[in-house]
Every structure is written in C-alpha cells, then in structure tokens.
Amino acid sequence: MIQLIRVFIEEGWKVTFATAAGESVYAADLESMGVKTATIKINCSSFDSLIKKSNPDVVLFDRFMTEEQFGWRVAEQCPDALRILDTEDLHCLRHARQRAWNAGIEFVPPMLFEEETARREIASIYRCDLSLMISEAEINILKNLFMIPANLIHYLPYLYDPLSTEQIQTLPGFEERNGFVSIGNFLHEPNRNAVLWLKDEIWPKIRQLLPDAELHIYGAYPSNKEFELHKPEDGFLIKGRAENAYDVLKKARVLLAPLRFGAGLKGKLVEAMRCGLPTVTTVIGTEGISEPTDWPGKVENDAELMAKSAVRLHRDQSLWVHSRDCGFRIINERFHSSNFRNGFVEQLYRLKSTLPLHRRENFTGAMLMHHTVASTKYMAKWIEVKNKLKGL
C-alpha cells in the first residue's frame, strides 16, 4: 500500500487515506508524506458524505473486505471514480491451502470452488474496474480457473530501486553474520504454523548438527502461547516485534521460512534478498518470486532435508555467496520499479479515459454490483439504524 501511495504522490495526485481501523503507534506517518488522513465508520452513512465531498477520480480498496463494505457506496456517490482493488494476495487460495493441510490432504486448485472466500473475493474482483495482483501464479489461477477477463487484472509486484554495487558492498558478508532468523506477524496463520514446525521438527534436527546455533524468531503480536516456545537452552528464541526488520535480517546468516500454506509474495523472503540474506523455504514460499531451481538458498518441503540444507548453507561460504548473489539478481530483474511503475500509471489513465466502455464490457461486474447494492445496502442501513437506536 505504501508503495502505491508513493506512486500516486509522484504523479502529483492528492491522496487521502481513509480507514476504519483504530490508531496505532506502529502506523506509517502518512501525513509526513503529504497524505491527508480520514477516519471512517463501517455501516455508517457518514462515509457517503465524505466520499461525495472528496469526489475522487480514483478509489483504491485495500483487500476485498474493504470493497465489500464501501464499494457500493463509492459506486453510488462517485459513479465516475475508477475503482481499484488491491488484493494483496488471493485470500481464498491461502484459506483453501490451509484447509487442505489441516485435513491432511494435498491441495489442488479445484478445491477453490468450494471456498466461500473465493465466491466473495472473485465477486469483488468483478465489481472493480481493475484488480492489482502481486503474483503471476495467482493471475494464472484467476484466468484459467475462474476465467477472469485479462482486462480486469494488472500484475504489479513489489517495486524496488535496483541495488547498486555500492549498496551491496556495504552489506555484512558471510563472516560478519551468524545464526538463523525467522520473521513474520504471529497473527498470520501461515507464520504461526511455520514457527510450530520449526520448534517441533526442523530446529531440533539443526541443533543436532550445529549444537551452539541460535534461531531468533521475530514477529508482531506474539501471544503467551508463542512466548511459551521460548527456550534459550535450545537456542530457540522468541524475540517479539522487530523495530527494524532490515537491521535484524542483516545480522543473520540464514533465514528459515518453512511455509506449509499461504499465498501471494512473501515479503520476508524478498526483503531477505535485498539485504543479502540467503533463505531456506518451501515451494509455497518461492511462488511468484522465482523458480525453485533458481532460488537464492534452498527449497525443501521435508523437515529433514530442510534442516540439512539450512546447516549446509550456514557452513558453506561459497554456496552462501552464490545464493546471496542470486537474490540480488532476482531483486534487480524481477522487482525493478521502472519495469512496472509507468505501465501501471498508464493503465490507470487509459481506463479513466475509456471507463464507460470498460464497464459495458464487464456485464458480470455490473450485475454483481446491482445485486450487492440491492442486498448489502439495505443490510448496512438496517445496522446503522440499529446502532443509532442503541445510543438513545
């Protein structure tokens, strides 16, 4: 989201960030970027007045749940505004994979048809004029499984300036780093599951081969259950929130990301590449970033093999350097901002100038919006009245 906001500001657009979430000390300082902020409420007509007064040219929804709540209101109050959905990842894919893992069965794409989340998410994609996807693998699912028209989807991965030789030379080398690290928000189930797999199976095998090794696990919102996993005597350290993830990653020699389910691009893995940190992950972790055969580290789906690969990467300097350099190449080739930024902006201007035709060609989206307004609108109004009556 921050990267998108920066693109809009660079284009000279006036940006307002409206949120129903409460304030947080960890929130980005948007006002210092020149972004106006606004607090909005769910199921409240005050949003109608706000959006009508603002009269935006473009409205960006942060994930499909936000579009469900506010999309119909935007369509009613600002019918000429371009509506964009920032999917972040395919939630239905993550949920279906998790459900399959919990059931002990192999995930296959047709399982998505049974997901309620898929029905909601695909409907949201159709209702919007454009949906941003960060993973080419997920674009393939939308096109080939759900038959989403190509003109409703736009590939926009993470955007980074290329790493220069000077930047790379300032990063710590093999000898200056030590130990293992894992990082990820504990509220995100794939991350919690990965930590449990590390604790139960992978880390004990690593410690057998490297008895003095330590694994530092960072992540926001750890619960008491997570802190109970903290075992200094085993080198298994739950550290909590990292104040600066980049600084944390620069100190470690190997990042462990044993993800058994998930979707989208894994930010921790891309960030590790940017700071010269090789990684050991699963095929799920590589999705949308690189082929497993060209991974900057090792790709394994078995605990025993993952442990052995992690130890080898930690010990073998030449393998480590090769993996690190592979990560730099992926960042500069696959996530170079100039490869995607201008095309994205041009697409927005093009859609804005041809919006009536674009929407006529998306009859399914118009039909879904019609029925959403007919149902969600009056449910929202009923909830609003109910809440007002509670306050009397």
Image (cartoon, helix red, strand yellow):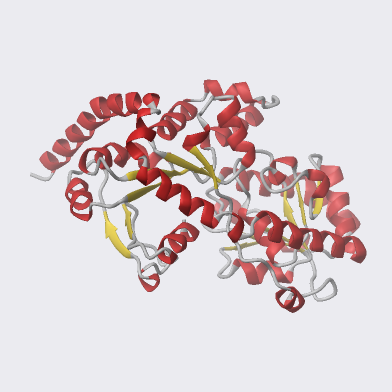
**Which residue does the image show at 58% across and 55% down from the upper left?**
158
- In the visual, does 266 lie left or right of 385? right
* Quadrant in which residue 245 is drawn: bottom right
> Residue 347: where, in percent of width, then height?
47, 47
What residue sits 40% from the left and 69% below the top? 29
Q: In this view, does 307 lie to the left or right of 52?
A: right
Q: In which quarter of the image is residue 110?
A: top right
Q: How many labels does the image show?
A: 0
Q: In this view, does 21 lie to the left or right of 165?
A: left
| Left or right of residue 338, residue 254 in this image | right
When the figure is inspected, residue 286 is found, relative to residue 357, above or below; the finding is below
Residue 62, image x, y percentages = 42, 48
Which quadrant, please, contains the C terminus? top left
Q: State the image coordinates of residue 221 (x, y, percent, origin top left).
A: 51, 56
> In x, y percent, where is residue 256?
74, 54
Name the residue rendered at 79%, 44% in the picture: 292
Looking at the image, which is closer to me, 342 or 330?
342
Q: Is residue 235 visible?
A: no
Q: Is residue 68 visible?
A: yes
Residue 261: which quarter of the image?
top right
Q: Is residue 64 above or below residue 143?
A: below
At horizontal 54% and vertical 25% (from top left) the residue drawn is: 146
